[in-house]
Amino acid sequence: MWLVLCEDHDAAAHWAHQGLVARGLQAELVTSGSLGAATRWVHRLGPDGGELEVTLADGREIRSGEVRGVLNRLLYAWNPQIDLARDSDREYAIQEIHAFHVSWLHALPGPMLNRPHMQGLSGRWRSMSEWLALGARAGLPTRPCPLDADQTPPWLASPEENVRTVITVGGQVLGAPSAALVDGCRKLAELSATPLLGTSFRLDPLGWHLVGATPHPDLRLGGEPLLDALTAALSRNRARILA
Amino acid sequence: MILLCGIPSESSLRRVHHELVRQGTPCVTLDQREIEHINLQCTIVDGQAHGTLAIGSSSWRLEDFGGVLVRMMDDRFLAEIRSEPKDSRLRAHSRSVHDGLNRWFEIASARVLNRPGAMASNGSRPYQAQLVAAEGFSFPETLVTTDADEVRAFRARHGTIVYKSVSAVRSIAHCLEDGDLERLEAIRWCPVQFQEHVAGYDLRVHVVGREVFATAIESDYSDYRHAGRDAGKPAELSPATIDDDLAQRCIRLAHALDLPFAGIDLRITPEGRQVCFEVDPSPAFSYYEGHTDQPIAAAVARYLQTDAPVPFGADQALRRWRQQEIVSIDRR
C-alpha cells in the first residue's frame, strides 16, 4: 500500500493520487480531515523501530507494516477536540497534536516525499531569504533579497511575469527553463533535505534567477512526466529518504 | 565579536558573558526586554547576510559577529509585550525583529548556538527519539496512543510506566499510578505518550563542540529536575567520568542533530544500558555548573570564538541524507 496524505482541498494531491493508481500503485488517499476524525491511534517506538496503527472513521485501517511509500502533503495536524479545549489548554493541545504527527509520519517506512520536520509536516518550511541563501549555496543564481518578510524585493514587483516553476522529484528535475539550472535544483533539494521540491525562477535581463522554493509545489505543473517520476521515486526498494 | 541574545539576568547567559569578559573578548548583549530599541536590517546577497544590528544608539555589522549564543524566550511572553494589545505597534515591532533574528540565525556564517531549525527537533520527543536511535542510542520503549487497552497492556508488560507530553510543553514525567486508571479513557480525545520506566542513575552530558562534560545525578524522583519542588528532596549532582566511546558517541549525536551545544539526558541502568531521554537544544547548564563547578560556560565562550568557518546546517543535512542513501536498510 502506498499512502497519499494531504489536506482535503489539495487538488494537486488528488490529481497525483489518480495518476499513481493509473500507473499501478495501490495508493490510498488519506486526508487530514479523516486523520483528525480517526477513532484509534497506536504509535509504538522500540528497539525494532516505529510502528503505527490508525483506524479511520470510515473503517479503513492504516498499518505501517503495510506501507511501501508515502506522498506526504499534509500541512496541518488537525483534531476536532482542540476547539473544545479550554483557552489555557488549547495551545498545549495544538503543540501535542503537531508533535505527535511529526513522530508517526517520520516512523513510516519506505520512500516518503517529503519527510516531516517540526517546521513543516510535509517538509521544512523556510523563509524566502533562507531559500535564496540555500539556493546560492547550491549554485543557483540569485538576486539581493531583504531578510524581512514584510519587504518585497524589487524583482518581485511583478510576481507573475516570466516566472517558471521547476519540480524536483527524487533527484529528477522537471521543467527547468535552462539546462544550467538542473544541477542546482537537484543540489538544493539535497541541501534542504526536500526530495520533492518546487523551485521558482524569474527571467530578467541577466538571466534566470531563483525567487523561491516550496516543499508543497502544485504537482499538476509537472504533468505526466511528473507522475512517472513520482511513481519511480515511490516504488524504489531502497533506503528511506531522510528529512 | 560575540553576540549574546536573550535575557541578561538568565544565569546561563550571564555565565557565558562573564567568561567572555574575563577572557577579554568583545561581546554585545541583545537584551530582549529592550526590544523597543532594537532594529535589524539585513539583505541576502549571493547567499550571504549583510546588514546591521542596532541597539539603542549603537550599531554593528552582522558580518562582524563571529559567534552567536541564542537563549531567547518567546517574545509573546516578554513582560514588555504580553500585556500589549494584539495590534500594538510594539508587539508588531517585536515580532518583526524576532522573526528577522531567527532568519538571520539560520543562515549566518557565524557560529550559532544553536540554529532554530535544528533546535526544533526537541519539540517532539518521540520524533527526536527516532533521530537519537539512528545514531545508535537506546531510548525508552514508547507508546503514544488513544487506546486505553493498549496502555493497560503496555503497563502489564513493563510494570512501572510513566506518562509525559509528546511536545516540549509541560514536559514533566509522572508515574502512572493505580489511581490514574480511573481517568485513562480520557486519552481517547488526544494521544498521550507513555514510556517504560527505566531504573538507573541519570547522567547529563553537555556537549560543546568537541568538549564533553558529564554530570551524575542522584534522585529518587521520576523527574530529577522537579525533585526539590515536588518531592521535597533536591537531586544531588556530581562530576562524572565517562569512557571515550560514550563521549565520542555523544559528540556525534549532538552534531548529527546540528546541535554543537547540547545537553544529552542519559540514564544508565544497573546492566549498563545507556538510555537517552532527550537532547536539549538550549541546555540550562548553569544548574549543573553551579553544583559541580564544571567549566561549561568557559567551553561555550571558547567555542563561540573559534575561527574555523562553520557553514550553516545545510551541510549536515546533506551528509545525513547521503549517508542514509548508502547505509539504510528497508525494514520490510
Image (spheres, rainbow, N blue to C red):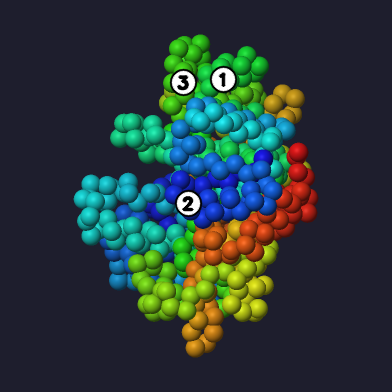
Label 3: how many Cα within 10 Å (few below 14, some 14–19, many 20+):
some
* Vertical side of A229 occupied by B65: above or below: below
Q: Give the Cα distance between marks 1 and 3.
A: 26 Å
Q: Nearer the viewer, residue B44 or A215?
A: A215
Q: Amino acid at mark 2?
A: Asp
**Left or right of residue B284, residue B136 in this image:** right
Q: Give the Cα distance between marks 1 and 2.
A: 35 Å
Q: Give the Cα distance between marks 3 and 2.
A: 51 Å
Mark 2 sits on what residue?
A10
Q: Amino acid at mark 1?
A: Val
Helix, strand or loop under label 1: helix
x%, y% of residue A180? 64, 79
x 44%, y 21%: residue? B186
Task: Name the mark nearer the viewer: 3 or 2.
Answer: 2
The label on residue B231 is: 3
x 51%, y 31%: residue? A58
x%, y% of residue A83? 34, 35
Chain under callout 2: A
Going from N to C along the chain, the mark reached first, 1 or 3, is 1
x%, y% of residue B246? 73, 41
Task: Name the mark nearer the viewer: 1 or 3.
Answer: 1
x 42%, y 62%: residue? B101
